[in-house]
Amino acid sequence: MNAPVLVLKDSLKRESGTKVHHGNIQASKAVADIIRTTLGPRSMLKMLLDAGGGIVVTNDGNAILRELDVAHPAAKSMIELSRTQDEEVGDGTTSVIVLAGEMLHVAEAFIEKSYHPTVICRAYNKALEDAIAVLDKIAMSIDVNDRATVLGLVKSCIGTKFTSQFGDLIADLAIDATTTVGVDLGQGLREVDIKKYIKVEKVPGGQLEDSKVLKGVMFNKDVVAPGKMKRKIVNPRIILLDCPLEYKKGENQTNAELVREEDWEVLLKLEEEYIENICVQILRFKPDLVITEKGLSDLACHYFSKAGVSAIRRLRKTDNNRIAKACGAVIVNRPDELQESDVGTGAGLFEVKKIGDDFFAFVVDCKEPKACTVLLRGPSKDLLNEVERNLQDAMSVSRNIIKNPKLVPGGGATELTVSATLKQKSATIEGIEKWPYEAAAIAFEAIPRTLAQNCGVNVIRTMTALQGKHANGENAWTGIDGNTGAIADMKESKARINKLNFFFLIWDAYNVKAQTFKTAIEAACMLLRIDDIVSGIKKKQAPGAGPSKPTIETEGDADNEQILPD
């Protein structure tokens, strides 16, 4: 009577209950442990071999996790976290993972005591709201136009990265680039589009100190006819086109039947006249430089060089957009629609230079460029890739400051303040939620603890001293100096970097911190809510397609096989 009822197929594997919770928590902790050592200025680098045999050397949390191939589903969603953080605010990719791993770690004790996951999540969400409230309280507003302050902030972001040894270099590049492309939206809002209008051009060779932000753009192209066309033009008039300057070919095969021999000449003449027509229309505006995204025929090239105009063809669309933004030109789709207002006159110099083996065209000294190129030089490709990753982070941070000019203390001070406040608040919470709430408060200490671990100081002693300082609530700005592991005041921190007596304050941007907390806690709640994993689901077959029969080789087939040569 009571025969077992099979609902799922045999091929499906199902895990449920606490087993899943423990599995998820273990997987998340494993991911957090991979990049735990890359937090802070004394961080280690990781070397990853990718599928193509290339190597990536980095300590950027997102870059490391991006290369990992993970089997466990919970670990995959942890990796997504760091990607979200990177896309949203660009910094704090490591802290998110460490914090989320810690949140899950402290939840494990409650799962074992058979607390319901929803209770834990409720407490966590309450802790998140209070943490954001604390952030608002200790945040400090700054003036975006005060370059020294912004520089300090961007530097404390890069302080944990590989390029911190080059002093102000990367921070300066990042601030220059983001202030260049910032666009006022009115009502005190500024929009900075890093992806579209800032191009990072990596050219191996030279020294890192030669890197600079151009007041304009550069791209990897030479003029069409190097001997005949000028490679240097001062105050050029630039026309940007999005159409081919060659004879239109038929969409498909076009057959023309010619009866008389002269007709052939007429046909060729028509083609030539068509191109001449286009060139005359363009040359009416007396340009010095014509750039098109499509092809440019030899004949058009001849007309241009005769008129003393330089031409560049087959440029990328994104590059063309950047040139338009830099010199104030408008990209035109048809030559007969050209107007005087479409000609870009904002550039001060067009020049083609040879760097290494390649020719690069520069459109620089622009009056008010709204796009720019960051030229990075360096000894090797791997180094340049790492510098570029660090630069991206730095630009994101300076973009965040421009958008929301508020600071919170760095060096683990924010987390300790949040932790101390939440511990005090937990006394007022009634019922069963009190314990997970307090655990969440303790979990925030993972960040300063990891910083202390990476410095190699006595973790327990340092943490106890810090907790004591924060418990009185006397100074929210007390944290760990990431280089020495000493307890320092972040407002007056005189952190020494690489034996340079270079004083700066360890700060973080407010929205990087807020995003870190939100992402970490929400992800922890999501993973705790999972109580069932069903795996082994096959892809659906197309209807009517039965299972394919295995092919059996007969003796007749064996003769048809080609014998491999020795």
Image (cartoon, rainbow, N blue to C red):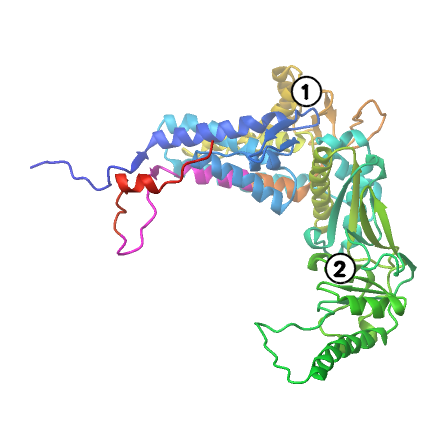
Residue at 76% x, 49% y: name it: 178
Does the magenta segment cover residue 523?
Answer: yes
Depth check, front residue: 507 or 364:
364
In the image, taking residue 436 as reference, residue 212 lies left or right, namely: right
Which amino acid does the dot numbered 2 rest on? Answer: Asp
- Residue 492 placement (x, y as % from top left): 79, 30
Depth check, front residue: 44 or 117:
44
- Residue 153 placement (x, y as % from top left): 76, 38
- Residue 363 placement (x, y as % from top left): 84, 56
Highlighted range, magenta: 519-545
Residue 528: quadrant of the picture: top left
Q: Is residue 403 above or below residue 562?
A: below
State yes or no: discs 2 and 1 in contact (Cβ < 8 Å): no
User: How many numbered circles does the render carry?
Assistant: 2
SS at badge 2: strand
Depth check, front residue: 283 or 484:
283
Residue at 26% x, 47% y: name it: 547
Q: Choose the circle earlier in sequence order: 2 or 1.
A: 2
Q: Which residue is mark 1?
A: 455
Label 2 Cα neighbours within 10 Å, binned few <14 / some 14-19 / many ≥20: few
Label 1 Cα neighbours within 10 Å, binned few <14 / some 14-19 / many ≥20: many
SS at badge 1: helix
Screen quadrant of the N terminus: top left
Specify whether residue 339 is in view.
Answer: no
In the image, taking residue 466 as reference, residue 240 lies left or right, namely: right
Residue at 70% x, 37% y: name it: 385
Which amino acid does the dot numbered 1 rest on? Answer: Cys
In the image, taking residue 548 as reference, residue 194 lies left or right, namely: right
Q: Which residue is mark 2?
A: 184
Alpha carbon distance from label 2 to label 1: 42 Å
Residue 309: quadrant of the picture: bottom right
